[in-house]
Amino acid sequence: MPTLASDLDLPMMTMDDGSRARRFTERMNLPDDVWLVRNLVGYSVWHYDDATAILRDKRWHNAAGRIAEIMGVTNEQFLGRQRESILSAEGDTHLRLRRLVAPAFSPRQADRLRPFMREVMNDLVDRVASNGRADIATDLCEPYPIPIICELLGAPKSDWQLFSRLANDILEIFSLDMANKLDLIMRSQQELDDYTTQLIADRRDKPADDLLTDLIAAEEEGDRLTNDELVMMVNAVIVGGTDTTRNQLGCALSLFAEHPEQWQLLAERPDLAPKAVEETLRYFGAVRGTMRYASTDIVYRDVLFPAGTFVGIGIAESNKDASVFSDPDTFDITAHHGDQPHLTFGSGIHYCLGQALARAELQEALPLLAQRMPNLRRDGEITWKPEGVGIFGPAHFPVTFDAGH
Ligand code: HEM
């Protein structure tokens, strides 16, 4: 007979435990045989095997669409919209969307943008290169993803500013007081929807070499995305693809600032970029965790989780699980820690749709920065962003480096 989860005598994970473990990549201070703890909304797991088992079990549904509800949002228009997004859709609806859009997010499509990625990053570095100092978070990480997402979608350069503003407003959904910012979020979502609707109409008239054209043409067995679904996908790309990338770049650079020998190695051996990117994603991923809820009663490891139970998945902690990764606490861009993939892009049916693009963005940015910012050093404390719902990174990150490269 399985034991009801609420009948178990479990340690409580306080906000402090969570923050500490998240922020500083420390392990939670619990014995290895404790695999389940309580948190404020349900339970948490953080061993690699439990994290992957739950992420790959389709009965556990993505809680992304329910975070707003947990935070007290009651606006049905907003909540309904969240549920329809690919980020939180489930079952056949999700499968259909995923099948239709996946080819447009292939590595080949991401590779097309690599020269543009280098151009964007070179332009950003040009503005600080002669000073020998910069705030990496605001000067480089924040502005990097927007032009790339615009280029990906086919939005012109004249609209970068507009996109940046709309993305910033919409990304407030990741802030802890999103319930208070709902008006702003919804206004900007509407503005983006109108903008995207126009862009879609333009592309229908005049196809181009971009994601939107690919999504419009995407077809499987006579099935196509509707206009509303196309608009939703653009929203999902902005929500999924901007804050994640800029914070991941910031997290990666904070590691290199502490490991100058690795920075120098990457400058000398840019061919190490793919390995360096995977190691930074594993060691310090910007997505620290995610959440699932039981869509039905689920028995896992002889514990009964009634339908509706929330379970937090500790991605960061799983990436340091010593039973899966050898020498997990050593940051080394040449190391092979094992054959299992890190979980920073998730696992299972919601595995990051933009992973090829994100990997390309990081693989282009990091060696370029290593070569143009030699001797990168932290120049004061890093101010970390307040912890939102799972995405983490530096808000301010002052550095010095050798000028003129
Ligand atoms: C380093 C950067 C990134 C990280 C760390 C990251 C991480 C993740 C993770 C962990 C998930 C799964 C969430 C879950 O299962 O609960 C996910 C899903 C997703 N990501 Fe990313 N992501 C990144 C960049 C991107 C980019 C650049 C795009 C778009 C161009 C993107 C679009 C998406 C979408 C649409 C989903 C939902 C897929 C689905 O539910 O089927 N991501 N991402």
Image (spheres, rainbow, N blue to C red):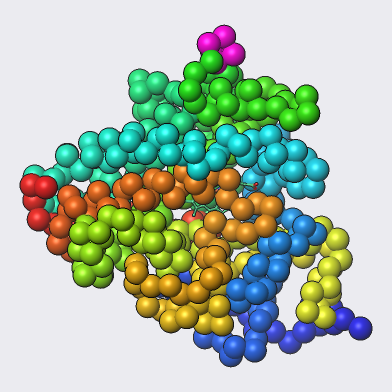
**Looking at the rendering, which quadrant does residue 112 occupy?**
top left
Q: Could you say where residue 233 lies in the image, as x and y percent from the top left?
A: 61, 34
Which residue is depicted at the point 46% across and 31% down? 152
Magenta residue span: 201-206
Q: Specify the quadrant of the image occupied by residue 330.
A: bottom left
Let me know if residue 296 is in the magenta part: no
Farthest-out residue, right: 1
Q: Nearer the viewer, residue 121 or 389?
A: 121
Write the residue at 56% across / 69% down: 340
Dominant secondary structure of the magenta stretch? helix
Q: Residue at x 78, y 28 (%)?
A: 221
- Whether residue 127 is visible here, answered yes or no, is yes
Magenta stretch: includes residue 205 = yes
Quarter of the picture containing the N terminus is bottom right
Quadrant position of residue 327: bottom left
| Percent coordinates x, y for residue 390 in the rendering | 53, 59
Outermost top residue: 205
Q: Which one is nearer the viewer's eye here, 3 or 388?
A: 3
Q: Is residue 308 left or right of residue 339?
A: right
Q: Is residue 125 above or below residue 54?
A: above
Estimate the x, y position of residue 342 in percent, counting from the top left: 52, 65
Q: In screen coordinates, is 311 left or right of 239?
A: right
Give coordinates of residue 302: x percent, y percent.
82, 80
From this view, report whether residue 17 is shown above or below residue 379.
below
